[in-house]
Image (cartoon, rainbow, N blue to C red):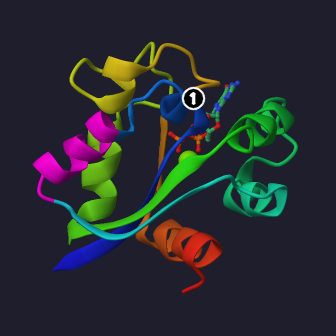
């Protein structure tokens, strides 16, 4: 059964000109692009997306970084889309992400780690609502 997830190409990757190659990874895997929008997040959207991390030492830096420039916001769909996208993205810390994953191939440090993807179907519903108002 098809599932939806929220995926976002982060500002560092947009600045570095990686958008096309990253989107190709998801298309190559067979996922469908349902929605896509380019733009800079408001601090309110960033805070809503990262509410679970509020109060952690990296939280302020995370909100500053994710609002520092345009991102590519996407809703992707396909069988098991949430887990498939997390697998394609790789581990949170690019230094530990496997080669062949997006973070492993394009990233080096955890505070600028190229891509975001929902971590569960419930998070996906919440995040699609934040960014696409559904
Ligand atoms: N600077 C810093 N950033 C972090 C750290 N842990 C997580 N982050 C950032 O916060 C985001 C959200 O963290 P988390 O939900 O744990 O990881 P994700 O679901 O794999 O993105 C990550 O993608 C990183 O951008 C950390 O220890 N230090
Ligand atoms: Mg997360």
Q: Residue at x 80, y 37 (%)?
A: 64
The stretch in magenta equals: 20-30
Residue 97 visible in this rendered orientation of the protein? no
Q: Quadrant of the C terminus?
A: bottom right
Instruction: Assess whether residue 26 is covered by the magenta stretch.
Output: yes
Image coordinates for residue 24, horizontal then vertical, percent:
21, 43
111 up-or-down from 34: above or below: above
20 up-or-down from 17: above or below: below
17 up-or-down from 3: above or below: above
Q: Is residue 61 left or right of residue 28?
A: right
Q: Identify residue for label 1.
A: 12
Cβ of mark 1 under 8 Å from ligand 1: the answer is no
Q: Residue at x 23, y 49 (%)?
A: 26
Q: Few, some or many C-alpha atoms within 10 Å of disc 1 (few <14, some 14-19, many ≥20)?
A: many
Image coordinates for residue 73, horizontal then vertical, percent:
50, 58
Residue 15 visible in this rendered orientation of the protein? yes
Q: Residue at x 57, y 68 (%)?
A: 127
Q: Is residue 13 left or right of residue 80?
A: right
Q: Quadrant of the N terminus?
A: bottom left
Image coordinates for residue 90, horizontal then vertical, percent:
35, 32
SS label for mark 1 = helix
- The count of marks equals 1
Instruction: Assess whether residue 99 is covered by the magenta stretch.
Output: no
Q: Residue furthest bottom?
A: 134
Mostly what secondary structure, the magenta segment?
helix
Image coordinates for residue 106, horizontal then vertical, percent:
38, 21
């Amino acid at each position: 059964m098809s599932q939806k997830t929220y995926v976002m190409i982060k500002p560092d990757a947009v600045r570095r000109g990686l958008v096309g190659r990253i989107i190709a990874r998801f298309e190559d895997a067979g996922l469908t692009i349902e929605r896509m929008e380019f733009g800079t997040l408001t601090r309110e959207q960033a805070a809503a997306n990262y509410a679970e991390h509020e109060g952690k030492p990296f939280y302020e830096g995370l909100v500053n970084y994710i609002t520092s420039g345009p991102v590519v916001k996407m809703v992707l769909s396909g069988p098991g889309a949430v887990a498939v996208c997390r697998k394609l993205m790789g581990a949170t810390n690019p230094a530990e992400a496997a080669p062949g994953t997006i973070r492993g191939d394009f990233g080096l440090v955890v505070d600028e780690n190229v891509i975001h993807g929902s971590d569960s179907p419930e998070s996906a519903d919440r995040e699609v609502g934040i960014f696409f108002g559904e």
